[in-house]
């Protein structure tokens, strides 16, 4: 599948800048897939105004591949997103060595996904030329969104030269930048700019520690002759946006509504520290993100969307003090939550009928 085959409406969302939650995995108390709640969460995202979903990614738990859930989880999300209409984006996470990543890309293509988010964690330590060859082989199957992933959750840093070469690969349509590092984020932006790829490689933030300012700030690119351009990160593909989705969508819409060059209201700037504080609690920043996925599930559990915070890995649990931190930010920043909205619609999402094809 080539980028040109992505439906025009879905591509327009991607280029404008989309709000894309990283979809979690909903399990029963017995560590089995809870299909009713899995579908309910996708319905929540769609009704809350998300532009699509990313499935099979870190927030979905990489271990779904070990228990035969990769295809079922992608299929369930695709059915619910298509039911919502309006050309919402379907993005599938792919990982592993080349044979596995290509196979996963083919599965995503067969299920009607628009692009793959390419996780390179399994290639850590390989020469960058070898990693680029891997990327080209996946891009031969599906449009690719690059992924700069921080080491704390299994990623590794790649060089400026790597990102220059990556941005020139045919069928690369975007890069999610999640190094949680200002220097490396700027380096990726500069690499895309320096190979004149900014018009076809849309920049997305995955920096959950810096969401608002990533979306607000212009990145100044200045040539030796003094010519200056300004690049922008257009949207977010974020684990933090797996929770409290309605205010996240509204935040992105407010940022998009600002005219280029306009003064940024102080209250909008202040939201950067507020959103970062909320994310620190949910993601368990005090413990180097150890409770990241359970933290997202805990927010959904409190809202009634999840039954528990259980993960496939029994050792992946909330950290000591994390519940109290989540309590604190909910009390401090109620405007950043959407509890009332979820309560109003929860029964409808949970009662939604399962498509006959499922």
Image: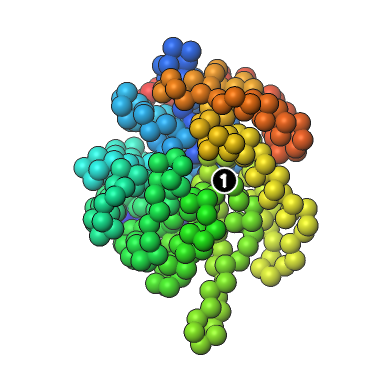
Q: Is residue 99 left or right of residue 268?
A: left
Secondary structure under the numbered disc 1 in the rendered image: loop
Give the residue drawn at x 48%, y 51%.
179
How far across and how far down the image is residue 199, in percent? Answer: 46, 67
Name above or below for residue 252 compared with residue 301.
below
Q: Is residue 89 left or right of residue 337?
A: left
How far across and how far down the image is residue 247, in percent? Answer: 68, 41
Q: Is residue 18 left or right of residue 333?
A: left
Which of these two is toward me, 22 or 342? 22
How far across and how far down the image is residue 162, in percent? Answer: 34, 62
How far across and how far down the image is residue 281, in percent? Answer: 63, 35
Q: How is the image coloured?
A: rainbow
Give the residue drawn at x 63%, y 62%.
217
Q: Is residue 150 visible?
A: yes
Residue highlighted by disc 1: 208
Name above or below for residue 356 compared with residue 12.
above
Q: Specify the quadrant that holds the C terminus.
A: top left
Give the residue drawn at x 53%, y 74%.
221
Name above or below for residue 53 compared with residue 43.
below
């Amino acid at each position: 599948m080539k980028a040109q085959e992505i439906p025009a409406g879905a591509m327009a969302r991607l280029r404008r800048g989309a709000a894309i939650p990283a979809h979690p995995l909903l399990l029963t108390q017995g560590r089995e897939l809870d299909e009713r709640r899995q579908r309910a969460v996708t319905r929540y995202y769609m009704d809350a105004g998300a532009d699509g979903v990313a499935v099979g990614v870190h927030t979905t738990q990489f271990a779904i591949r070990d228990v035969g859930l990769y295809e079922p989880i992608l299929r369930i999300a695709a059915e619910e997103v298509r039911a919502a209409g309006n050309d919402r984006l379907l993005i599938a996470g792919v990982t592993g060595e080349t044979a596995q990543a290509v196979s996963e890309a083919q599965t995503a293509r067969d299920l009607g996904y628009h692009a793959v988010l390419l996780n390179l964690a399994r290639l850590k330590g390989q020469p960058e030329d070898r990693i680029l060859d891997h990327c080209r082989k996946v891009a031969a199957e599906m449009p690719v969104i690059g992924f700069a992933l921080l080491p704390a959750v299994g990623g590794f840093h790649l060089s400026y030269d790597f990102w220059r070469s990556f941005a020139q690969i045919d069928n690369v349509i975007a890069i999610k930048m999640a190094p949680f590092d200002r220097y490396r984020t700027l380096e990726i932006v500069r690499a895309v700019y320096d190979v004149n790829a900014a018009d076809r490689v849309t920049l997305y933030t995955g920096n959950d520690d810096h969401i608002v300012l990533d979306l607000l700030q212009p990145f100044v690119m200045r040539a030796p002759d003094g010519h200056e351009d300004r690049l922008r990160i257009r949207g977010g593909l974020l684990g933090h946006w797996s929770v409290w989705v309605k205010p996240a969508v509204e935040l992105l819409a407010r940022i998009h509504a600002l005219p280029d060059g306009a003064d940024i209201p102080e209250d909008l700037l202040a939201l950067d520290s507020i959103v970062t504080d909320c994310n620190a609690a949910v993601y368990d920043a005090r413990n180097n993100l150890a409770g990241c996925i359970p933290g997202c599930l805990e927010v959904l559990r409190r809202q009634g969307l999840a039954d528990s915070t259980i993960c496939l890995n029994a050792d992946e649990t909330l950290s000591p003090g994390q519940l109290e931190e989540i309590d604190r930010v909910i009390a401090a920043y109620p405007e950043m939550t959407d509890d009332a909205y979820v309560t109003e619609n929860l029964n409808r999402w949970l009662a939604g009928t399962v498509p006959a094809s499922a």
